[in-house]
Image (tube, rainbow, N blue to C red):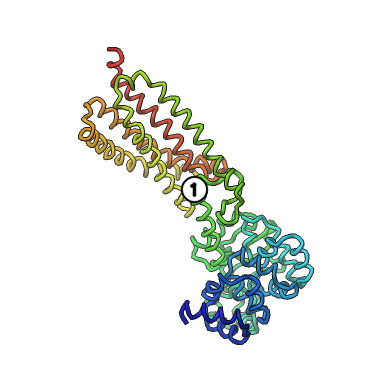
Amino acid sequence: MNREELAFMLRGLVRTPNPRALRAAIRSTPAADLVDALETVAIADLVRLFVDLAPSELASLFTYFDPDRQDELLASMPLAAAARLVEELPADDRADLVARAPEPLRARLLAAIDAVERDDILKLSAYPEDSVGSVTTSDFVSVRADETVDEVLARLRAGVEDAETIYVLYVLDDDRRLLGTVSLRKLVLAPPDATMASIMREQPVHARADWPRRQAAELIRRHDLLAVPVLNGGDRMIGIVTVDDAMDVEAAEDARRLTRFGGTSQFGAGDLDLRSSSMGTLFRARLFWLVVLTVFGVVTSTFVAAQEEILAEVIILAAFIAPIVDMGGNTGSQSATLVIRAMALGDVRLSWRDLWFVIRRELPVVAAMGVVIAVLEAVLAFFSKDVGGEVLLVVGLAMLCCTVIGGLAGALLPFAARRIGADPATLSAPMITSIMDLVGVMIYFGLAYALLGDLLQA
């Protein structure tokens, strides 16, 4: 069934609910495609469509709706149905859902949910939003070190439907401390009487619940894991972060870096969202950096205005101010983007060794680019403006210096931001532009006074 046929069928089900046809569609159609086709359906119609579904059937669709749509659906459903749905959701998803709910609804939901699920929700939702604990699920398979392969396989066959994954089993002691992991492949291939202790992988990679959640995603990517175990402050295992959750984390982090690199985030403020952020929040966060840039711009323009004497003698110098300062900012933004990407991928860390590595890699590149751009600028200036040799030398050297300094500044600024505890993407783009505007005109007019000063004396 293609997209148009699916949408047509669902519109018919909205007008005339048919639980049997909807269940057949759920069984035969990927959940993501069904949810995509239901995006334009009103919330009230969705609730009427879903009312006859079993909680497990609804849960299989519910997780594919975006968070805002999930919140609206939950608030519109009868309390009993909403509580049953929450109990069926994966542990990390239900913790996030309940944490987002308004306080009155949250209290009613928690009171209606089974005590075991309620305790699990409260435990996971206690972690800060950006921590590993907030994306941890407690639905995993744990085994004892003295259990045999036969015993574990029998338990798996008996049913572990609630587990997020069974491809990795976690060997815990009586205090829920992580002893090792056993892959499903190793379990199936091991002798029936072998114990978990004899086939487990000791000292597995793990994350801490209070770490930033991006670190769990980095571990999963770096070690090609399907899930990473999560330990609390007492070294007890509380759950796992799965690869699909890690993908969501990295997608959110990418969106956050894009927002901040554009200078649309304030220190300590949450991420901006065009749909959900208020107009006041959008105004304040964006205005902050514009004010910073304006202050730098006034300082730069004041410096340029003070060069009235040499500009009066060599007026053609004014024509090259914009391209020279722009080149420094553009080169710096390129370098900063490369370094921030390397930091995000874990290829570069906050250390003197990596700092020196970046300088050794970047300096020859920006120096070579500076020479090419300087020669190109001089050639274009000669043919388009009939500029004399001394002015061409000033313009070329200024372009070379701004390109090199801008590239190095862009490469080093993310390290400085990390060192003071700020987000590199938040600082880099606006600060590089502002700094290189001021540094660029200082370099330009410094060279002009050094090489054309005899004109002033004359």
Between 76 and 223, which is closer to the camera in this rendering? 76
Outermost residue on the front side: it is: 15
Give the residue displayed 66% in from the left and 55% down from the top: 128
Disc 1: which residue: 349
Give the residue displayed 32% in from the left and 34% down from the top: 399
User: Where residue 417 sits: x, y (%)?
Assistant: 52, 41
Between 404 and 57, which is closer to the camera in this rendering? 57
Disc tally is 1
User: Where residue 310 sits: x, y (%)?
Assistant: 33, 20
Outermost residue on the right side: it is: 111
Between 140 and 330, which is closer to the camera in this rendering? 330
Question: Quadrant where the C terminus lies?
Answer: top left
Report whether 386 appears left or right of 159.
left
Residue 357 visible at all = no
Secondary element under disc 1, as helix, strand or loop, is: loop
Vertical relation: 11 (above or below) 417: below
Vertical relation: 20 (above or below) 251: below
Give the residue displayed 57% in from the left and 43% down from the top: 421
Residue 439 visible at all = yes
Label 1 neighbour load within 10 Å: few <14, some 14-19, many 20+? some
Vertical relation: 380 (above or below) 44: above
Amino acid type indicated by mark 1: Arg
User: Where residue 100 sits: x, y (%)?
Assistant: 68, 61
Vertical relation: 324 (above or below) 452: below
Outermost residue on the bottom side: it is: 20
Q: Quadrant of the rendered structure where residue 112 is?
A: bottom right
